Image (tube, grey):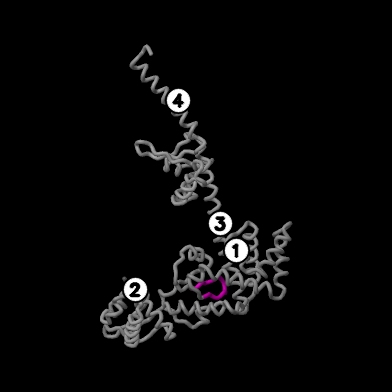
Amino acid sequence: MAGRYDLNTIIRGYSLRMGKPRFNFTSFAAYAQKYAERLVSEGEEIDPRLSAPEQLDSQLEELASSGILRLEKQDDRIKTIFYPKFYYYEIHKLYKDIEQKSEEPFPSLESTGYEIPDGAMNTVDVKTEFVELLKKKDDQEIVRLTFPDTIPSILTTSTMVENKMLEFSVQKIRNYLNTHRNAEYMQSRMRGIFKNREASLKDMFSKVLTQVRTSISSLLEPTDFSFQFWTHLASSMIQEYNKKNNRTALENAYIQSAYMLGLYNMYYKSISQREKDKENALKQVRQGFRNAPYFFTFNSIHSFKDKNGVPLSKRFSLDDLNAYLRKLTTSGDNKQLPEVVRVRTPDNKEYFIHRELIIPLTLKKLRDTNEILKRSIRTFLPCF
């Protein structure tokens, strides 16, 4: 058993305790040995190698080869340990402050003064790579978001981009709308786009100003209206601030938030659309059970096509189809057959048949078999 505590855990704790990413090997080795002894005395589960100081060098080399840390040597002996993830945790601490003070600008590499080495940070172009970053879902990666024109970059992490930067961006937009009657100004700009939907537009602005969680939900689970709303609001803000040559730090945060929200909006809309396409395709699969020949193998179901001849399987995965078939072949109350019945033949072939077609299909097969029997009998008994 590796144990709950390993060398990586101890290095992380030591780095944060020291308040720096780079520290002396000798000092750390003494600390690690004492720390491991204390854990053992307290009955904690540890990696057995922690109790063998002579294995410390080889463990550090393993962590270095996997990119978790860097070793700086002198005369082939480890002199200094550099732990880049220190900055990852420090960045999260910075965002804790922003969580309490929403008017604070986003941190940047320049504003923090961090010296993050090449390879320890992923630089992402917001316009071309942000959506791919959302799909990646790579935990604990330091990320520098770069923006077009003269908009400064943002220092964040992959974890923050996945779940928190959206929330921070909505809060920044809310702050913007609450400043200098900007809500009224933006609402008037967007009225021409949402003709005959003034009441919905007004209600949406009201929710952004007063209901942060509801606003976030409208991005995560978009309707056609909310998607259009966020698209035009973000675009209008970007146009507004791109005109300014000398933006304040807070104004930069507004335009950064507008860029990110526009991309979050498109990303979650695409997910919503794919989900709708999948649901529609699976409904067509369900309808397909009522078509000839009325009995189907799994492979033939997977080959169902829409009215244009396009395979429905382009809109769902094998796992989606398996889950949907399990649902259709499971009875809800055990008092009647499930909607689709699985039938296994003597030669071990499996077919799926709609319950309403079992009797008609059985009778048809009996009639077909009857005709075959009659022909066979006539062959041997012409007088029959």
Q: Are marks 4 and 1 in contact (CB under 8 Å)?
A: no
Which residues are the magenta region? 144-154
Is residue 25 found left or right of 139 in the rendered image? left
What residue is at 53 percent from the left and 66 percent from the top?
127
**Image position of 207 with respect to 291: above or below:** below
Amino acid under disc 1: Ser
Mark 3 and mark 1 lie on one chain; the one further toward the N terminus is: 1
- Disc 1 marks which residue? 217
Amino acid under disc 3: Ser
Q: Are marks 3 and 2 in contact (CB under 8 Å)?
A: no
Q: Are marks 4 and 2 in contact (CB under 8 Å)?
A: no
Give the Cα separation between the discs numbered 4 and 1: 58 Å
Q: How many marks?
A: 4
**Image position of 346 with respect to 225: above or below:** above
Amino acid under disc 4: Arg
- Disc 4 marks which residue? 367
What residue is at 43 percent from the left and 82 percent from the top?
16
Give the Cα separation between the discs numbered 3 and 2: 41 Å
